[in-house]
Image: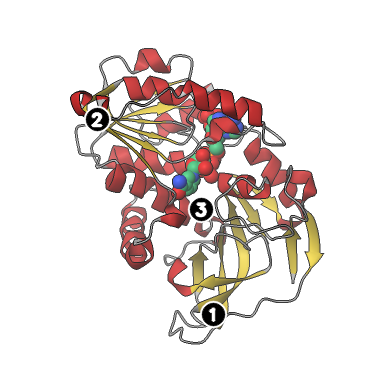
Amino acid sequence: MRAWVAPRYGPPEVLRLQELPDPVPGPGQALVRVRALGLNFADCAARLGVYPRVPNAPFVPGMEVSGEIAALGEGVAGPSVGTLVAAVPIFGGHAELVAVDARFLRPLPLGMDFVAGAAIAVTGLTADHALFTVGRLRAGERVAVTAAAGGVGTMAVQMAAASGARVLAVASSPAKRELAATLGAHETTGYGGYRGALAGGVDVVVDAVGGSVFRAGWKALNPDGRYVLYGFAAALGPGRVRYLHAAVELLRMGVMIPSAFVQSTRSLAGFNLSLVPHLAGELQARFARIEAMLAGGGLRPVVGAVFPFERLPEAHAFLQSRASTGKVVVTV
Ligand SMILES: NC(=O)c1ccc[n+]([C@@H]2O[C@H](COP(=O)([O-])OP(=O)(O)OC[C@H]3O[C@@H](n4cnc5c(N)ncnc54)[C@H](OP(=O)(O)O)[C@@H]3O)[C@@H](O)[C@H]2O)c1
């Protein structure tokens, strides 16, 4: 098979298209013939070597794919060979074939194509976990969503609006804000106007940007407010990791005094979906919830750009450049 290998950690240009032996599915795994792959910001972080549990280089990045089951490993009862699936291998998905833990795949909803199928799993599950499990968002509450026009953000805006919350979408360009508005955001703002837009308070913030953006949202939380931090995009720039810039952004988040949380009656929680221990057991139920929203028309995957497999490094550079909207998908 062909696979995009990161021979060392670094910018998109380090990626090399290579011939590798076909993977063999181990016990509990399914082999997926990849038809499309959904690019995640985490793939950029993995390529840069700053993602949790990233394999030593050389390695094949790739968190998320859609495709067809080609073979089943020992102890896997289904879905059967030939089933079209969305799958989350975490690593290894930038390839024509990938072996995936069978708990982390799901048959594609009937009629859904591979491009859309590569855009629903990580975005849907992350937005759902951030808003409703960790954020405990309720109808009538006001929620701020940062990076609202991105892959996860476009799902979060739609899900929050559909739940009856009032959505403030935060995004860096007018085109991104316009997209968020078409997806149901009631209010939009750029980062410059974010502090002002938060006047009046906010009940929940779902934030994957962090840095100085965190500070504004944290200060604006209403009593019983929940701040859900699930990424630190502010630390990355185009190209390499800028450690000095990341350190400054970290300092801008401020100093936390735990005892002050008592009187201010608010909470701060972080998560990385791939590290939530009980998630594997709940995954199918959560997938089913997202599929019901997709089928009901209240949710749609937003694909902003599609690249061919041979140009995958360009797709990486595009996502990391901050110019993308919705999900960036690569077809195989
Ligand atoms: N914890 C988890 O389990 C989990 C799971 C999935 C994703 N995530 C996180 O969720 C975020 C969104 O992921 P995604 O894959 O859907 O990516 P994405 O939102 O499509 O792209 C990242 C977005 O982050 C914003 N951003 C802010 N500062 C940036 C910077 N310095 N460089 C580049 N982008 C910057 C940009 O939106 P604006 O220009 O509008 O700011 C950009 O569009 C990422 O931070 C990712 O790490 C976390």
Nearer to the camera, 241 or 302: 241
The answer to which of 265 and 20 lies nearer the viewer is: 265
Check residue 266 in the rendering and tell me which mark sits there, or answer none. 2
* Left or right: 205 in relation to 213: left
Q: Is residue 329 above or below residue 150?
A: below
Q: Report which quarter residue 219 is drawn in.
A: top left
Residue 301 appearing in the image: no
The answer to which of marks 1 and 2 sits earlier in the sequence is 1
Q: At x 34% / y 62%, what residue is drawn?
A: 278
Q: Which residue is mark 3?
A: 119
Q: Could you tell me the amino acid type at mark 2?
A: Arg
- Tell me the distance, in whole angstroms, between the alpha carbons under discs 3 and 2: 33 Å
Q: Position of residue 46 (x, y in %)?
A: 62, 50
Apparent side of residue 296 relative to residue 90 in the rendered image (left or right) = left
Q: Quick check: 124 above or below 74?
A: above
Give the amino acid at mark 3. Ala
Residue 82 is labelled as 1
